[in-house]
Amino acid sequence: MTTTSVHRIGGEIALDHTVSWAPPGASGSQEVSAYLVRGASGAVLVDTGLRLHEDAVLAQLAELLDPGQPLSVLLTRTEMECCLNLPAIEAAFGLDAVWYTGGITVPRSHAEVRRVSVEPGTSQWVEPYPGLRLELISPMMRLLPTLWMYEPETASLLTSDAFTHGGVDGRPVESGLQKFAWFTRAETTAIAAHVRQVVEERPVALIGPGYGSPFEGANTVTAQALMLAAAIEKVGVR
């Protein structure tokens, strides 16, 4: 019986030209998410959500966390959509540690700072709380230093700013590559291969991106990984 659960929190934004990661002509709405990983002895919040959604994020955490439950934060990137709710979350619930990668300063916190360094294309296991083991993957699909997180009990892969094309309106997989414009000037075979490798080497039942809808089910996850890898290869230099 699993003692770990993963919960998506956050809200929606209007998708238009003001959203930096949106492709030209984008419209409608898009989910922007953080994820709470609850273990038997503590919980880890993966990213903190948009400042726009601060009230919703705090309310959702209050429903999901037990009173006094130990809590840490893992930032997949130190970009604004990942970290700006950190002070409010710490004030409301307290934080034991903030895990992150890269060298950019994050909002001030009184929690222990746990900076991790993972070479691109490799991974590192951490145990923020006893029995809660998380694999931190450094993807080759990146703009800035980035972490994907894999939780083995629920087979959940949280992919930050990758796999972001999911939604009710059937966006093409290429729509998730808008912020990776450098791919058009790069040889992308290895990047695509690593996307496939991450999904092939571990059981994955859920892909949870930082924005866009999650993908659920092993077959769906595999299909989406193959499509994303193909799109990455297609835009690269040949």
Image (cartoon, rainbow, N blue to C red):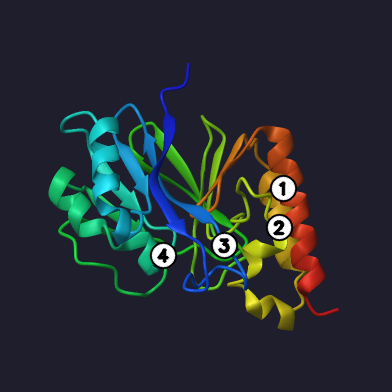
Mark 2 and mark 4 residues within 8 Å of each other at the beta carbon: no
What residue type is disc 4 on? Answer: Thr
What residue type is disc 1 on? Answer: Gln
Q: What secondary structure is found at the residue carrying circle 1?
A: helix
60 on left or right of 13: left
Instruction: Measure how far apart labels 1 and 4 are at the Cα level.
Output: 26 Å
For residue 164, which quarter of the picture? bottom right
Instruction: Measure how far apart labels 2 and 3 are at the Cα level.
Output: 16 Å
Q: Position of residue 170 (x, y in %)?
A: 68, 50
Q: What secondary structure is found at the residue carrying circle 3?
A: loop
In front of the other: label 2 or label 3? 3
What residue type is disc 3 on? Answer: Ser
30 on left or right of 238: left
In this view, the residue farthest toward the top is 1
Q: Which one is earlier in the sequence, the residue at label 3 or at label 1?
A: 3
Q: Which one is earlier in the sequence, the residue at label 2 or at label 4?
A: 4
Instruction: Measure how far apart labels 1 and 2 are at the Cα level.
Output: 8 Å
In front of the other: label 2 or label 4? 2
For residue 132, which quarter of the picture? top left
Which residue in the protein does label 4 denote?
A: 101
Which residue in the protein does label 1 denote?
A: 224
What residue type is disc 2 on? Answer: Val
In the drawing, what numbered circle is on residue 140? Answer: none
Which residue in the protein does label 3 denote?
A: 27
Q: Position of residue 176 (x, y in %)?
A: 63, 62
Q: Which one is earlier in the sequence, the residue at label 2 or at label 3?
A: 3
For residue 36, which quarter of the picture? top left
Q: Residue at x 62, y 34 (%)?
A: 205
Instruction: Measure how far apart labels 3 and 1 are at the Cα level.
Output: 22 Å
Which residue in the protein does label 2 denote?
A: 173
Label 1: few (<14), some (14–19) or many (≥20) C-alpha neighbours in 10 Å: many
Q: Residue at x 46, y 21 (%)?
A: 2
